[in-house]
Image (cartoon, grey):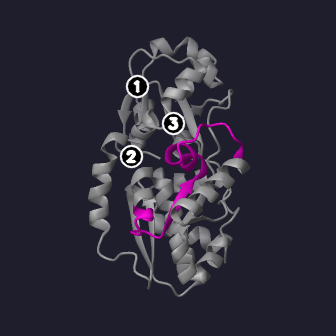
Amino acid sequence: MALAGWTDRRIVGSLLLATLAGGCARSDRIVIGAKNFTESDLLAEIIAQQIERRTSVPVERKLHLGGTFVCHQAITAGQIDGYAEYTGTAFTAVLKQEPGPGADSVRRLVSNEYAGRWQLVWLEPFGFNNTFAITVRQADAERYGLKRISDLAAIAPRWKAGFGYEFLERADGFAGLARVYGLQFSAPPLAMDLGLTYRALADGNVDVIAGNSTDGQIEALRLVVLEDDRHYFPPYEAAPVVRAAALERHPDVRRALSELAGTIDDAEMRRLNARADVRREDIRAIARDWLARNLP
């Protein structure tokens, strides 16, 4: 869910869209994009391979494009035809809504708004909720008895925090979290690429981060996710978002992707991410193996 700071996204987006230009979303194929982190690349590869397995439509991949802003701009401009998005991200970062409603309400609202504003179709969710994970080292959790985010308030003034760029700026990010939980750290949080935050925490460079709950590195690095006991974060159900025009051109693509609904729970997504991030397996091979086992 990370990207360069929101203030420079228009520049980054313009450069990326210029790179993508040149007819990459032509009617004879489907172009699948991804954000710039492992899980998004994995889901994009699963989507792409599922289309290739079930239809005769050629698929072009545009993986690791950037964060939410870049991918949203790419799909609304017709430079990609689909990618995996998260309901809570769409609700807060794109539609600028305040966190609060439950999963069903959020899903209905983003589906209706995306269809009405941009002719984008939210297909059924994969089945997992990748919420932000406020994460600390296991040793610190045991030493200070940290189980809930609210437990951080007492020790935050002595701690350093490090967060992804996007988390520092979006509506459901740090400012609201600090307000709801009364968090004030020893210094303003360090801004860094989301993928670097885990190692920074494990190595002691920072004391708390906001990761993703389905990341495989959490267990591998002996980190602990604190409970969101004040229910600050909205649901983040991952689902394919596809241009309506692409589905109209290729109705068999919708049928193929409908088979992915409800097939990946939280634990399974963590295992897939760990295969890529911890065991360093090839993303295409992971997707191919998962599809063969689950959707033969």
Check contact, mark 1 vs mark 3: CB within 8 A.
no
Q: Residue at x 54, y 35 (%)?
A: 222
Is 85 one of the magenta-colored residues? yes
Rounded to the nearest angstrom, the CA distance separating label 3 from label 2 is 15 Å
Q: Tell me where residue 117 appears, x and y as whole percent.
A: 53, 60
- The answer to whether residue 67 of the structure is visible from this angle is no
Mark 1: secondary structure: loop
Q: Earlier in the sequence, mark 2 or mark 1?
A: 2
Q: Label 1 belongs to which residue?
A: 189
Name the mark nearer the viewer: 3 or 2: 3
Q: Tell me where residue 46 appears, x and y as whole percent.
A: 54, 68
Query: Residue 139 occupies which quadrant of the picture?
Result: top right
Amino acid at dot 2: Leu
Q: Tell me where residue 276 appears, x and y as whole percent.
A: 48, 56
Q: Earlier in the sequence, mark 1 or mark 3?
A: 3
Q: Residue at x 33, y 40 (%)?
A: 7
Check contact, mark 3 vs mark 2: CB within 8 A.
no
Residue 26 located left or right of residue 49: left
Is 2 one of the magenta-colored residues? no
Q: Label 2 belongs to which residue?
A: 3
Residue 135 located left or right of residue 201: right
Q: Earlier in the sequence, mark 3 or mark 2?
A: 2
Q: Relative to 60, say whether 168 is above or below.
A: above
Mark 2: secondary structure: loop
Task: Give the residues in magenta.
Answer: 74-103
Give the total of numbered labels.
3
Amino acid at dot 1: Pro
Q: Label 3 belongs to which residue?
A: 171
